[in-house]
């Protein structure tokens, strides 16, 4: 039985784009730290702001990390079927 090797294209562009977006998000957050603290602690419908911010950072940073690991060649081990 011959085995075939499938070469996946490395996501260089996505890694760079999500890295820049992640870095820009952190810079914007810390540059406006006073506004963020004042606004996010008001209560009421402002309670949505921290949740949206947490989801934003989770998605962007997670996508960057995943693409970075793929670019470096680190992939999850695939279990062989019996």
Image (cartoon, rainbow, N blue to C red):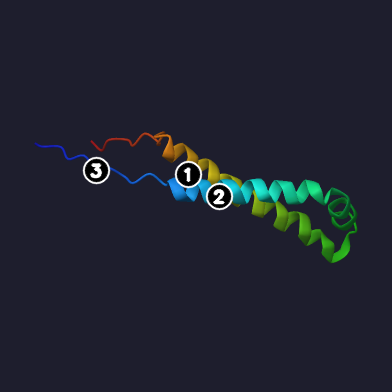
The percent coordinates of residue 37 (x first, y second) are: 87, 51
The percent coordinates of residue 13 (x first, y second) are: 46, 50
Which disc is residue 4 wearing? none
- Quick one: quadrant of the N terminus? top left
Residue linked to disc 2: 18
The percent coordinates of residue 67 (x first, y second) are: 47, 44
- Label 1 Cα neighbours within 10 Å, binned few <14 / some 14-19 / many ≥20: many
Is 20 on the left-hand or right-hand side of 39?
left
Lower position in the chain sequence, tag 2 or tag 3: 3
Mark toward the viewer: 2 or 3: 2
Lower position in the chain sequence, tag 1 or tag 2: 2
Tag 2's secondary structure? helix
Is 7 on the left-hand or right-hand side of 30?
left
Tag 1's secondary structure? helix
Residue linked to disc 3: 6
Numbered-mark total: 3
Residue linked to disc 1: 67
- Quick one: quadrant of the C terminus? top left
Front residue of 54/64: it is: 64
Front residue of 75/64: it is: 64
Q: Residue at x 39, y 35 (%)?
A: 73
Q: CA distance from mark 1 to mark 2?
A: 8 Å
Q: Quadrant of residue 62?
A: top right
Tag 3's secondary structure? loop
The percent coordinates of residue 5 (x first, y second) are: 21, 39
Q: CA distance from mark 1 to mark 3?
A: 18 Å
Q: Residue at x 77, y 54 (%)?
A: 50
Is label 1 in contact with label 2 (beta carbons under 8 Å)? yes
């Amino acid at each position: 039985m011959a085995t075939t090797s499938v070469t996946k294209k490395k996501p260089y562009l996505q890694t760079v784009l999500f890295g820049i977006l992640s870095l820009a998000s952190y810079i914007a957050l810390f540059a406006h730290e006073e506004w963020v603290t004042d606004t996010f602690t008001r209560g009421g419908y402002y309670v949505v702001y921290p949740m949206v911010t947490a989801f934003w950072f989770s998605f962007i940073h997670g996508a960057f990390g995943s693409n970075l690991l793929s670019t470096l060649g680190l992939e999850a081990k695939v279990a062989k079927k019996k």
